[in-house]
Amino acid sequence: MKTVVTYSFSQLEPYINWVYFYYAWSLNGKPECERQRMKAEALDTLRQTDDRFKARAIIGLYPAWGDGDDIVLDSGERIPLLRQQHPAKGCDYTLCLSDFVRPAGYGEPDHIGVFATTVDSGMETDCHGDIYQQMLRQTLADRLAEAAAERLHYEVRTRLWGYQPDEPEDPARMLACDYQGIRPAIGYPSMPDTSLNFVLDRLLHFTDIGIRLTESGMMTPHASVSGLMISHPEARYFDLGKIGDDQLADYAHRRGIPITLMRKFLESNMIRQ
């Protein structure tokens, strides 16, 4: 089941994580008055553009099960993933996102969500040559794409998937990740391989919400987010860390991509010999 949702900026305003907005402007640690001045300016821009641009989201919910380091959908599509080669501090085992999806043979299939969100490209480009305004809009658009993912995840938990139907709508709790489930994003620590977007695109057809992929799997518009939604009560975020040549070879085989090309996608995650 696929669902497309359109959000106004005013709908997403409560879900904006301003901490990362301040970070983008090097304002963390600066006086509160400076941060509030910048926030007020951003909110003014948001309200001026609310009737011109939108954020868009697409979500697919699929029966699935875990199979080693892959997630397998009922259609037969496999989502290959990477496993830590060294446990995180305080943990006795290595993690892979597929660990949080019920394996085949253990009752009914589990489910996963596959999602993408984006902001109309004009939000970043229609600035009439005003460089400062363009920078402000770019950082604000990034936050709006993340806010759309946060709002979408809430709707998935409570209504579309409905595994937490009684969860109250509390953006502050959501920004603190105080809910069941996770929504790891491609390009982030647990899924650093941007070329995985090609797998998700086959499922969702990103162009339905205006997203296109570069040769490396990067998304345009830049203010876009994609990833998975997993409901397991113990699911958590983690940093993949460094991987070795053996795991690279295994992952490239499961992806059906030459090792030399996969090495380029994962260069920053490779153990240096």
Image (cartoon, rainbow, N blue to C red):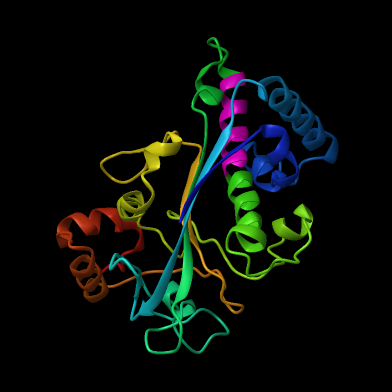
Residue 75 against residue 83 in the figure, above or below = above
Q: Which of these two is toward me, 118 or 161?
A: 161
* Quadrant showing the N terminus: bottom left
In x, y percent, where is residue 163? Answer: 63, 70
Looking at the rendering, which quadrant does residue 272 occupy?
bottom left
Residue 33 placement, left or right of 259: right
In x, y percent, where is residue 48? Answer: 71, 20
Q: Which of these two is toward me, 6 or 39?
A: 6
In x, y percent, where is residue 110? Answer: 47, 76
Q: Judge whether residue 217 can be spotted in this image.
A: yes
Query: What residue occupies the far top of the structure in this picture?
Result: 128
Residue 227 against residue 112 in the figure, above or below = above
Residue 41 belongs to the span the image colors magenta:
no
Please tell me which residue is depicted at 76% across the width and 53% down the height of the picture.
171
Q: Which of these two is toward me, 23 or 147?
A: 147
Residue 149 against residue 208 in the figure, above or below = below
Residue 108 against residue 243 in the figure, above or below = below
Please tell me which residue is depicted at 63% across the width and 63% down the height of the picture.
157
Q: Which of these two is toward me, 241 or 272?
A: 241
Magenta region:
133-145
Please tell me which residue is depicted at 78% across the width and 37% down the height of the picture.
35
In x, y percent, where is residue 84? Answer: 40, 76
